[in-house]
Amino acid sequence: MEQILSFLRDLAHNNNRDWFNTHKAQYQESLDYFRGYAGKLLAGISGFDPSLGNLEPKDTIFRIYKDVRFSKDKSPYKTHFGCWMTKGGRKSTDAGYYFHLEPEKSFLAAGVWMPPKEQLKLIRQEIVFHPEAYLEVINDPLLQKRYERGGKEDMLKKGPADFPKDFILLEEIKYKHYIYSRNYSDADVLDPKLSDHAVEDFRGLYPLVSYLNHAMSFTGNQ
């Protein structure tokens, strides 16, 4: 992992096409190494989430090239490697598992981030129709102790349209994202057992992922 962190540090200080093209071999070596790491994650996660069984690392890893068309920051490359592991791969909108590798900013996360409108509605409906099952997931002591909840900054100020405003868990259906994360220091990343630790952290988030995918699988009224 040290060679990836080293490459990403250098890229952050030289985020331009000339430098990148000159160091293309170093990028490819780093990508190959990260691909191997993603393979270890997939193998481990598939042990408790069989829906990932047919995925290959190449299906999960995001391109390093940025889309700068609508961005004020015109630097052409991302300064991290990331992989989104769920049925259907990185383009899927299903709930899944994400690993982000970046010097001093690495983390893993699981759940859904910015789900499409209809999928978000299905999640909210599931919470309204079966609040006990939802509470069992989010009140799990392991989830609360080990992970940080994301999406609080984007919550609706009022309840979503077409949902009861007196619902006992109204705050929960104000979320637009249902995701939890855990940060990794550079020392964590350089631990030889990183993949084992990450798989165990993802295992702790499997009930959340399973719940969300179950909720989004419904196509009609419950």
Image: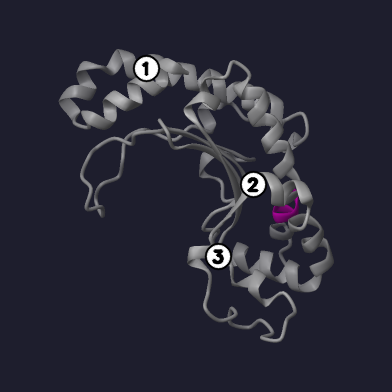
Residue matched to label 1: 28
The label shown at residue 2 is none
Which badge, 3 or 1, is on the more N-terminal residue?
A: 1
Picture coordinates of residue 13, whole percent (x, y): 23, 30
The residue carrying pointer 2 sits among few (fewer than 14), some (14 to 19) or many (20 or more) residues within 10 Å by Cα, namely some
The amino acid type of the residue labelled 1 equals Gln
Which badge, 3 or 2, is on the more N-terminal residue?
A: 2
In three-dimensional space, the C-alpha distance between marks 2 and 1, rounded to whole angstroms, equals 32 Å
The residue carrying pointer 1 sits among few (fewer than 14), some (14 to 19) or many (20 or more) residues within 10 Å by Cα, namely few
Chain part drawn in magenta: 210-214
In three-dimensional space, the C-alpha distance between marks 3 and 2, rounded to whole angstroms, equals 18 Å
Q: Compared with residue 166, is residue 58 higher up or lower down, i.e. above or below?
A: above
Helix, strand or loop status at disc 2: loop
Name which quarter of the figure residue 196 lies in: top right
- Residue 53 seen in the figure: no
How many marks overall?
Answer: 3
Residue matched to label 3: 176
Picture coordinates of residue 81, whole percent (x, y): 43, 31
Nearest the viewer among 89 and 136 is 136
The amino acid type of the residue labelled 2 equals Tyr
Picture coordinates of residue 181, whole percent (x, y): 59, 46
- Residue 185 seen in the figure: yes
Residue matched to label 2: 147
